[in-house]
Amino acid sequence: MNRLFDRIQRRMPPFAARWLEWLRKPEARIVRIPLGILFVCGGLLSFLPVLGIWMLPLGLLLLALDLVFLQGPINTAILRGTRKWTTWSRKRRDKKAAR
C-alpha cells in the first residue's frame, strides 16, 4: 500500500504531495477516516455536477490505510487497473506507430 501511495505522490504537484504526505502519517487518522468516507459518498453521488467518480477510489485508498480488510481488495484493484491501462496504452501507441 505504501509503495502505491509513494508512486502517486511522485506524480502529484508539490503542494498536493506535501498534503498527502501529512495525511499518511498515523496522527492524521482523525482526519483521514472522515475524509475517506466523504470522498466515497461524493463518488457515489457522481451524477451531481461538482462531485465525480474520481472521489470513490481516492476515498477507498484513504480508508484502506486504516481498515485492514480493505487493503487486499484495493491493492488488487489498483494493480489490475494499472496493468489494463498499460496494455491499453501500448496497443494505442502501437496502432499510431503502424500508420
Image (cartoon, rainbow, N blue to C red):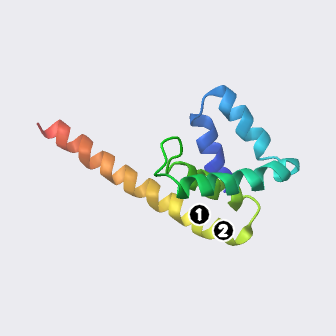
Kind of residue indicated by mark 2: Leu
Identify residue for label 1: 74
Which residue is disc 2 drawn over? Answer: 70
Instruction: Name the residue: 84% across, 47% down.
Output: 28
Q: Residues within 10 Å of mark 2 (few under 14, many from 20)?
A: some
Residue lying furthest bottom in this view?
Answer: 69
The amino acid type, in three-letter code, at marker 1 is Ile
Residue extending farthest right:
27
Q: Residue 3 placed where, x, y %?
A: 65, 51
Q: Which mark is residue 13?
A: none
The alpha-carbon separation of the residues under discs 2 and 1 comes to: 6 Å
On screen, residue 89 versus residue 69, left or right, reads left
Quadrant in the picture for residue 74:
bottom right
In the image, 13 versus 1, the foreground residue is 13
Q: Residue furthest left?
A: 99
Which of the 4 quarters of the picture holds residue 60? bottom right
Q: Is residue 97 left or right of residue 73?
A: left
